[in-house]
Image (tube, grey):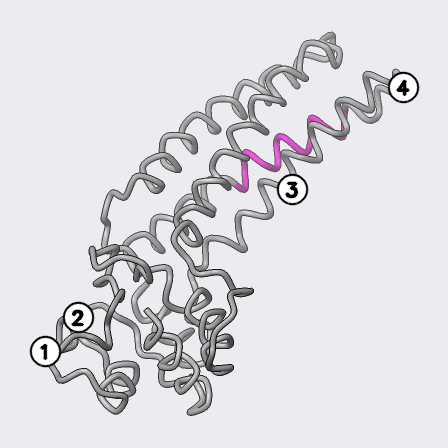
Amino acid sequence: MINSLYQTLSKIGFAHPLHPPITHLPLGLIIGGFIFAVVALVFNQKSFLQTARRCMVLALIALPPTVLIGLADWQQYYGGALLFPITMKMVLAAVLVVFLAVAVKLGLRKEYGPMRVIPVYALSLLAAIGIGYFGGELVYGTSRSAGEVFANPAAEKGVALFNKTCSVCHFSDKTETKVGPGLKGLFQREKLPISGRPVTDANVRLTLNTPFDQMPPFDWLSAEQVDELIAFLKTL
């Protein structure tokens, strides 16, 4: 069922993980809770502290579905591989649940002022920032810069396209496996990884349209976009 959802989204052009955009909800609530608590302390306004407490409650409620969607993405795009950034995200997510639970519990004690809750709110924020950092490392840690200058103008567009659609599963600067095989030096090889077909423009296009194994199809890419992607792959 979940795989069917991803395939349907891919067919309409959304071939990206679902987890990253969802994370903005709990992260925004945690940031808001911390800011409102600080404002309550600085201006001695209890109403802001109440708002901060509600933000933390909502963040705790939003966290489980965010984690579940992240686990679905992990299986879909990474095949359940325990890469270091993913492991760190899991550890920090567990820590964040504890911090948020403590924050909510403290919020139920009306006699506690901002000074009692701000430290826990700050720890929650730090855990959330850590999760975001390792999420960024997972996707962009080995990506080529979109501002990099290439002799072929199409390759300049291709690097941004690669970072957006391919870097989740493939290294561009290594031959090691990430989720799929590393693509460094792809067009210097005799055969494509997995399929074993000769390395040609036509076979790369064929792989994008009818991929092997768990790779989702990218038949929604335009012919021009595929040309740009191939131009970039030739620079690796």
Residue at 54% across / 26% down in the picture? 100
Q: Which mark is residue 103?
A: none
- Asked if residue 202 lies in the magenta stretch, the reply is no
Please state which of the two labelled residues, at mark 4 or mark 2, is closer to the viewer.
2
- In what quadrant of the picture does the C terminus appear? bottom left
Q: Which mark is residue 196?
A: 1
Residue at 58% across / 41% down in the picture? 26
Badge 4 element: helix
Q: In whole angstroms, how far apart are the C-alphas of marks 3 and 1?
A: 46 Å
Q: Are marks 2 and 3 in contact (CB under 8 Å)?
A: no
- Asked if residue 54 lies in the magenta stretch, the reply is yes
Residue nearest the observer in this picture, 10 or 181: 181
* Three-letter code, disc 1: Gly
Q: Earlier in the sequence, mark 3 or mark 1?
A: 3
**Residue 186 vs residue 218: left or right?**
left
Q: Earlier in the sequence, mark 2 or mark 3?
A: 3
The image shows residue 90, relative to residue 221, as above or below, that is above
Magenta range:
50-62
Q: Which residue is mark 4?
A: 43
Q: Residue 113: horizontal and vertical position, in percent?
A: 75, 11
Label 2, residues with CA under 10 Å away: few <14, some 14-19, many ≥20: few
Q: Which residue is mark 3?
A: 28
Q: Residue 15: horizontal and vertical position, in percent?
A: 41, 71
Residue extending furthest toward the left: 196
* Three-letter code, disc 4: Phe
Q: Earlier in the sequence, mark 3 or mark 4?
A: 3
Number of marks: 4
